[in-house]
Amino acid sequence: MLSSRVVITLIVLALVLGIPVRAQDNGGDITQKLQGFDAFMEKTLKDWNGPGVGVGIVVNDKLVFAKGYGYRDYEKKLPITSKTLFPIASNTKLFTAVAAGFLVEEGKLTWDRPIRESVPTIQFYDNALNNTVTLRDMLGHRTGITRHDSIWYKSDYTTRELFERLKYLEPKEPPRQFFLYNNMMYAAAGYSIELQSGKPWPDYVRDKILKPLEMNSTVYTIADMLKQPDYGVPFTEKRDSMELYKIPYYEDTEGLAAAGAIISNIEDLSHWLIALMNNGKYAGKQILPSKVLQATLEPAISLPNTAGETRGWWEVLNRAYGMGRQTASYRGRLITLHGGDLPGFHSQVSFMPNEHIGVIVFVIGNHLAPLYNALSYNVYERLLGMDQVSWTDRLLDIRLKNKKAGTEARSKAGYGRVANTKPSHPLSDYEGEYEHPAYGILKIGLKENQLQFDFHKIRFPMTHFHYDRFDTPDDEQDGKWSVNFSTNPQGDIDKATMSLDEAEATFTRRSPTVDAAVAQRLVGTYESPSGFKFQVTMRSGSGLYIVESGSPDQKLIPYKGLKFRVQEFADVVVEFVEENGQITSLKQIDPSGEYVSKRK
């Protein structure tokens, strides 16, 4: 054992030379420094009405503390342990960034060249993005594209289908100017890993990271989690009361796996944290490339000092996002961290590189989500002998004010409703499927004289609000959905508009299909009254086109029977005329009149 004088000398030398000082990891020292933490946690759970919290602490290369507070199953009063499995949600992202880093090391991906050079099949909204966006842009949330979570939330889209939807996401800002969190980019990165490695993302991550780190309890799906004996159960607080109630597991993570599918526990995550804290080494072996870990730490884009500027809380400064994690100064000490959030489960994995202290926090309950920051900070302050900032009180005050404001806001729902209005059409005219190229299908049904809303497994009856607007109930979990229908120039209900994510999205009624035999009957040469001839042709897989010499081909979109519309003009209808079982002519109908071309 070193004398106190030698220890002090080493610390002073480390400070002078810039050598990091490692925290002591003996059990007695940790127990002493955490004196009072249990009481603090009990009070915090009571004040916050919390179902349960799990806390793990890693010092140097050991898990030195793992304890649960409250319950993993609030109803059955089952305790949280170091083996309790929790969905870690977006804490998955650093696994994806590191997995991509293996391929960077192999030359199959690059951080800072346009990703299309490595993955030619990836397509963004336009060529400017195609020629610009890098893997670092995607993993650093700096593409300029907003998050569009309603594309994947509760959907059945595969990773490939999400990858193929990138091309419909119009950027809101130029690349590398703003931090715009985007789960879709991680789904695309996951599929890029599959394309370049030949293995689906789950298999690649398991082979390269989970198995070597002996994360043997870690799984990807709720179904697999429920096969284990020790797992968390999602409870949360109701919006307008303090009642805790059980909510369904969020299970639709397959397509978005690379952004948030991992399910783990304190013991397994301690292995991950040990490797991160020790330049990729675990159990004496180099598991993760140290160069890759350094790349994920490098700031890709700066984040504002929001808490300081808006509330005067300056403990957290100069935040920056790298790839799959962010860095900041916490009261003068470097910290790297990331959070994870899915319904009912919230988590944070963090560590201070220079102090070699890491903290894992799991919380159950959506209303407890802000706590993972507060509890992590409190652990660091205790272990480093710092005065404790009253984060839990600060954030509880905000939580209760927001809860009250939400209740008051919902009590005033319906403002602006115009009384005594009626829908413009019979309810049956609103039935159908409406499509958006990125968000997919909105189904509107009719049951017992009431419209039915169906979007990505979110299903509710709708009531008439005014004119052509219909609303769902305001659900405790899925919220309220409002749909405004509109007509085409022919007077048909053909569009449905909703507010999704950061903007309005308009869904267009899906066109009916035309039987190939019927379409073939329409093919031929037609002649206008002035003698101008043009062709109607059929192309395999894409339908009918009007082909005129010297003009772009015009696609015919099925409308009703032998009537078609054209993409360029909503007020134009093309109708084929049938007489005695034969197609005899084609009529173009627009606001100016009706023009007939005879079939030759």
Image (tube, rainbow, N blue to C red):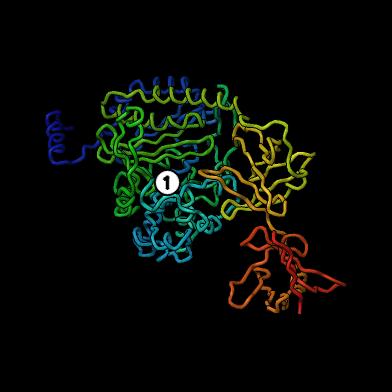
Q: Looking at the picture, tell me which residue is in the foreground, 82 or 425.
A: 425
Amino acid bearing label 1? Leu
**Which quadrant would residue 196 be assigned to in this image?**
bottom left
Which residue position is annotated with label 1? 180
Which of 41/326 is in front? 326
What residue is at 69 percent from the left and 74 percent from the top?
Answer: 536
Q: Where the C terminus falls, by quadrant?
A: bottom right
What residue do we see at 68% from left, 48% from top? 443
For residue 557, which quarter of the picture?
Answer: bottom right
On the picture, is 337 further left or further right than 265? left
**Residue found at the very far right of the displayed protein:** 580
Residue 38: percent from the left, percent from the top?
A: 39, 22
Q: Is residue 142 visible?
A: yes
**Percent coordinates x, y for residue 55 in the rendering:** 41, 32
Identified at 67% across, 40% down, the residue is 469
Q: Secondary structure at mark 1?
A: loop
Residue 386: x percent and y percent? Answer: 26, 26
Looking at the picture, does residue 42 appear above or below residue 160? above
**Crowdedness near tag 1: few (<14), some (14–19) or many (≥20) residues, C-alpha within 10 Å:** some
The residue located at (63%, 39%) in the rendering is 482
Q: Is residue 135 left or right of residue 462?
A: left
Which of the pair 72/554 is nearer the observer? 554
Quarter of the image with the N terminus in it: top left
Residue 516 lies left or right of residue 166; in this view the side is right
**In the displayed structure, would residue 178 be above or below residue 476?**
below
- x and y, in percent, of residue 198 in the image: 47, 64
Residue 224 visible? The answer is no
**How many callouts does the rendering have?**
1
Say left or right for 301 vs 46. left
